[in-house]
Each structure stands twice: as C-alpha cells, then as structure tokens.
Image (cartoon, coloured by chain):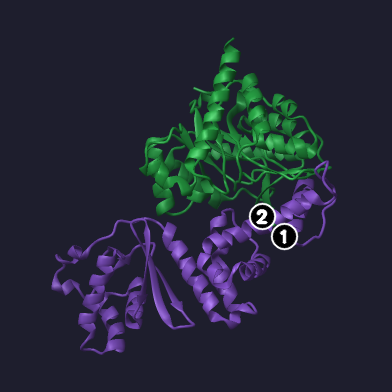
Amino acid sequence: MNVFGLPDLGFGLGLRPQHYAEILDGPSPVVDWFEAISENYMVPGGRPLAMLERVRERWPVVLHGVGLSIGGTEALDRDYLRDLERLIRRIRPAWISDHLCFTGAAGLNTHDLLPLPYTEEALRHVIRRVREVQDLLGRRLLIENPSSYLTWDASSMSEATFLAELAREADCLLLLDVNNVHVSAFNHGFDADAYIAALPAGRIAQIHVAGHDHLGTHIIDTHDQAVADPVFALYARTIGKIGTRPSMIERDDRIPPLGELIDELDRLRALADEAGGERAA
Amino acid sequence: MSALGELERRLVDGIIGRAAALDGVTDPVQAAAGTGFRIYVEAYRLRLLEALGHDYPKLLARVGADEFARIGRAYIAAHPSRQANLRWFGRALGDFLGHASPWRDDPVLADVAHLEWAENEAFDAADAPVIGPEALAALAPEAWPGLVLSFHPSLRRVDAKAETAAWSFWRQGLDVMTRRLDLDEAAALDAARQGAPFEAVCRVLASQVGHDAAPARAAGLLRVWLEAGLVVGV
C-alpha cells in the first residue's frame, strides 16, 4: 500500500490510442499500470471504452482529467461529474486526478489548464470545491501542480504553499509532475527542489514525468518529446527524499513507438532502484 | 463578481480575443513582455484547430491546411467552446460552413463536414446488442403491420445537399460502417426511425415505388437493416 491506502502500482504509462494494438495484441509490455485521460473515455460507447475495458482487464488503470476546472468560479459542471462518475463505475480506477487550474469563465471553455492567482480567496474556493467533488465521488482526488507561463501579481503565496494548504485542508492528495515543476521553476525563477520540499510528502500519491520544449528564454510544457535529463535528475532527487511513488511517463503528442516510452520508464525504474538503495543504506 | 472570478474572466477574455493584452501578470523572468499571455492565446487556437483537424480529416484533405486553418479560426471565433469535453467542440462546423461566407458558396464543404460529424458520432455512440433476421421468424403474420423497429444508438442519417445523396452511418461492433442509400430506402428508414409501424413504412415506400412493389421492397429493406446490424429490437 502507498499513501492513504492507495495501491503501490509501480511504473506506468499514459494510455494512448496509437498503442492500443501493441499493448493488447502483442507480447505483454512491461508496464505496471496505465493512466487514461478521463475525457477521452467520457463518451457513450464504441471503440474508446471497449479498448479501455480490455486494458483494464489486464492492468490497473488510473483516470486523469483535464476538464474539472477545480479553480473555476462557475458552478461545478454536474453533467461532467455525472459522466465522470459513470466512467469510474465502469473502469474502477485505482484513483482519479485533475489539475490545480481553471479552464474557462463566463460560460466559455478554453480547454487549457489556466493558472490561478494564489490568493487566500482562491485557496478557500478551491478547498470548498475539492471537498465537494470528493464528497460527490466518494473518494480522494489527486490534484496536479500545473506548468505555467505567467503568474498573477495578485498572488499572496507561492504555488507550493497553496498546494500544501489545499492538500491538508481539503484532505486531498497530490499528483506531483516533476516536469511541470522544472518548467515553472525555470519560467518564474524559483527553486524546483525547494518547491517540492514545501509540499506535504505524505500526500504525494503519484508522480508524472514528461518532456518539454526549451525555447531559451522560457520552457513550454509540450509533452511531445523525450524526457529531458534535468527532469530525470529532479525525479531522482525527489524520490531520494520522499521515497518511491507510482510514477509514469506522460507523452501526449508526437507519440513514439511504445518501446521508446518503455525505455524511458525503465530509466525511472533504475533511478528508483538507486534511490531505494541509498535510502536503505 | 469576486476578485478571483474577475481575474479569471480577464484571462479568458484575453485568450478568446476580446482583449488584446492582459495586465496584472508577470511573464517568465527571461522572456519579453507579453510572452506568457501570448503563449496561452496561441495554445488556445492551436488546441482547438487540432481538435477540428482530428474530427474533420476529409475536410482538411479537401481544402488543404491553410484554408482549413482559415475555416477553423472563423469557427473558433463564431462558436467558442461552452462545454468541458473537447470531444464535442466541432459539432456545429457543418452548419457553420452552410451559412458562413465564403464557404456557403461551396455546399460540398458543409456536406463533407456533416458526413464526417455523423461518422464521429457513430464511432463512440452508445453500445447495444443487435438482433438478426432470425428474430422475425417467430413473428405471427398478423403482427407484421404493427411491427415497430428500434435502431442501434449509433445510427446516423445525413442528406448531402450538393449531390442529393442520402447516407447512413452506424457501427458494427467497433467499426463504423457507411452506406449510400437509395432515396426510397432513406425515406423508409427515416420513417421507421421515428417509430412508424411497418404498414406505415410500406405506405412511405408505396409513394416512392408504387403500391404493388412496396411490400416486397419493405421486406427486402427490413432484411438489409437486420443483416447490417442496424436493429436492436422489434
């Protein structure tokens, strides 16, 4: 068992349609679990759900959402939550997650993970919403730290402080994306290790590792290329401090053959083995 | 409005193009002023355009990437997304192309979009077990006139206007099927989908193929629909 009674799943991959055939019909890939993008399967039926169910027959699955808009100021989207609940019943995920962000305002949806101002008002608001969703779904949410390209001057606390307070007061868990920490740390000039150290380690239930696009003056969180060495290094330092967590490679664009992602996953396994050895020693 | 709601609304207004700049924010420390805001603006258009390209590959192939981007930008401006799942963003593109200048001058474009959207809907519509022709074997002769069919939830009908053609899309198992329908079949299928009993479907066919030919045509179509996996209940 991992934190808060969640299973210690090991090393996973984001489930992408390009890999369905290789995952399901080839030799069983050495992947311990898969993470599915919730919205891609919040449809009535057909191939997407059938594929996800076939994967679920053989692997643990977690659901990762991009549309909850937990920081939005409009009422929670009941239709969305109903569809998510239906998917949860069907797939029985080990856990579900979404992002610390808002996605729209005034009835409009940007389908992006927009940064919140880290104010006392926003903190109270998000705590209320996380509690409400958790009560409705009857389970703890994992909330992921976002990557961002601007910060609000109105913010009165750091993102890490905001997340730490949120996790404790809403009694939710955290999905730590070390690439997002790396991206935002470079963009906004903060220390990535200090950010992670400020989070309540006992509530970090999953780790994302992904690739980005470094443009010299800033980094964009594209998930369209191999994981960069500084991100692997941050991952290694993180699990060296907090211990291993269910970890995965998250690739969303320019999807390579499955084998390339499994090679990256093996690098995470090796780093976890090293960190485990050092912690034991 | 709360301070939080006001800040959120300002960023969203800026992203969808109602404001040219955003104040009260700090950019990435090494980047030029305005960089952060522009990243969100650009990402918004690219993300929605990519979703449209995913949903409408045949339209994209027909008009080319540059024209598709022009269509996409106009559609994004006219129909900003109002729901949480990107899956449904492109729903209105066919109607948009049918009335927006200059694309309405080429009605094939709206047809292509309507057909592709129907195909998309069939792809992930609800599942349901189908019945085959054997389901009718036990039916008593006197039950035929009142026979009402229930169709698979994936069945979609589209009438292409430019070339006056009737199409149907549906799913067999996990695969989307498509068929061009004769106009009498399209009329009969539309009537049956609206719950018309078999004798009323026969009357629809009689108006198309004549009274004498209608019963045989109706029986033939019924067999075609059952064998194609369109029917889930009688």
Give x and y (percent) for residue B68.
61, 68
Q: Depth check: B2 or B231 in front?
A: B231
Identify which residue is drawn at 48% across, 33% down: A94
Left or right of A46 in this view: A76 = right
Determine whether B14 is above or below A193 in the image. below
Residue type at the position of mark 2: Thr
Whether residue A50 appears in this view of the structure is: yes
Identify which residue is drawn at 52% across, 79% down: B108
Q: Are marks 1 and 2 in contact (CB under 8 Å)?
A: yes
The green one among the chains is A
Image quadrant in which the C terminus of chain B is located: bottom left
Q: Which residue is mark 1?
A: B16
In the rendering, what colour is chain B? purple
Determine whether A227 is above or below A6 in the image. below
Give x and y (percent) for residue A118.
76, 38
Subunit ID for the residue under disc 1: B
Which type of secondary structure does the marked residue at label 1 adopt?
A: loop
Local crowd at mark 1 within 10 Å, few (<14), some, or many (≥20)?
A: many
Q: Which residue is mark 2?
A: A110
Subunit ID for the residue under disc 2: A
Which type of secondary structure does the marked residue at label 2 adopt?
A: strand
